[in-house]
Amino acid sequence: QVQLVESGGGLVQAGGSLRLSCAASGRTFSNYAMGWFRQAPGKERDFVAVISRSGLTTNYVDSVKGRFTISRDNARNTVYLQMNSLKPEDTAVYYCAAARLIGGSSRSEEYDYWGQGTQVTVSS
């Protein structure tokens, strides 16, 4: 079992930045690829970014490329999502998730554990 706790969400103006953190406990953190997903009101949960077990490989949805950066610190059992140049359309609840995969996936059904989510609101 892996427990995931997100933090760092909040209210920010368009163009601003936030850094989300996701702290993991339980099983060996480095055995899991880590992903970030988001869900806006009335919409499905969508893929945002993923990082491989080693941290060497990352992938992003096109809408956040160049603005968001995913990273991980395996010594601290934490994954981060640095979000810059935020837009109102980035408003959503952001979830981190863990998958028993080497490289990770953009498909939510391939993730085994999920955090409770953190709200990000970007005002125009």
Image (spheres, rainbow, N blue to C red):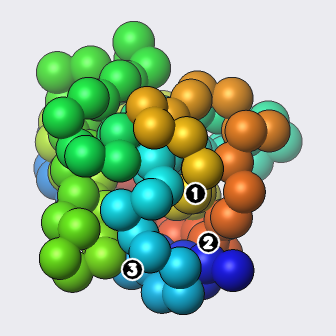
What residue do we see at 44% from left, 20% from top?
61
As drawn, 34 above or below 118? above
Q: Position of residue 48 (x, y in %)?
A: 47, 34
Q: Can the viewer see residue 11 in this picture?
A: no
- Quick one: 104 or 12, which is closer to the camera? 104
For marks 2 and 1, the one nearer the N-term is 1
Decide: marks 2, 3 in contact (CB < 8 A)? no
Label 3 secondary element: strand
Q: Which residue is mark 2?
A: 115
Split into 4 quadrants, where in the image is the C terminus? top left
Q: Which mark is residue 23?
A: 3
Going from the N terminus, do you reach mark 1 or mark 3 first?
3
- Label count reads 3
Which amino acid type is shown beneath numbered disc 1? Answer: Ala
Front-most of residues 26 and 59 = 26
**Label 2 vs label 1: CA separation?**
6 Å
Residue at 23% across, 58% down:
72
Say which element carries label 1. strand
